[in-house]
Image: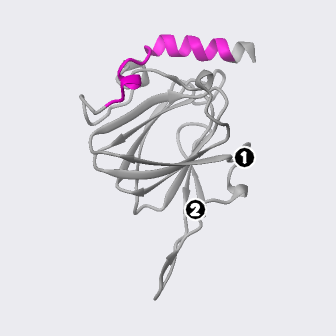
Amino acid sequence: MQKQATTIDGVFVHHLAPHEDSRGCFTEIYRESWLTGFRSIQWNLVTSGAQTLRGVHVHKHHHDYLMVLSGTLLLGLHDVRPGSPSNGMSELLPLTGESMQTVTIPPGVCHGFYFPEPTTHIYSVSEYFDPEDDLACRYDCPELNLDWPDAAPVLSDRDRSADSYAEMLEKISSVWQSD
């Protein structure tokens, strides 16, 4: 496994090492030692239809670790952590089932997932679901500086009615101040 930093501090792409022979392929997709600063406690499997966008979400405490199994995911990232060297920076990372990569996302980094085609991905988290730790803003907030390829993606009701960027930032800031 080879670890590559992104422009967002603390977000890493892990290039996995497939081992192929006449029987097929074996690839390690997770080792506890690959994750720094957190322990994975829950795994989830997600299927998404074409032109779906999930997010943009941010967590005050939990880390994410994800991998695309089939299809394509365009991962949008935006750092809102005060004092982070990449605060205010954004990045779009393309991930595919063929790329054999995983990504770690720390707390305070907003993330959204756009699927141009039917896609299956898995992800793990370091904390169980807590609505107080699952904040969101609209995917098209200009402050995110994310150039999504679809101006009218398929959204959940929650994501369609998500807060503005300023409201989300106010909520996460007040949570960090109370911790």
Residue for badge 2: 29
Picture quadrant of residue 114: top left
Quarter in which the C terminus is drawn:
top right
Amino acid carrying mark 2 in the image: Ile
Residue 18: image location, x then y, percent: 52, 72
Quarter in which the N terminus is drawn:
bottom right
Residue 7: image location, x then y, percent: 52, 39
Which is more toward the observer, 42 or 28? 42
**Magenta residues: mostly which secondary structure?**
helix
Q: Is residue 104 above or below residue 169?
A: below
Residue 101: image location, x then y, percent: 50, 57
Which is more toward the observer, 172 or 146? 172
Highlighted magenta segment, given as a residue range: 155-175
Asked whether residue 42 is drawn in magenta, I would say no
Q: Residue at x 59, y 61 (%)?
A: 2
Q: Is residue 25 above or below residue 160?
A: below
Distance in Å between CA atoms under marks 2 and 1: 15 Å
Residue for badge 1: 39
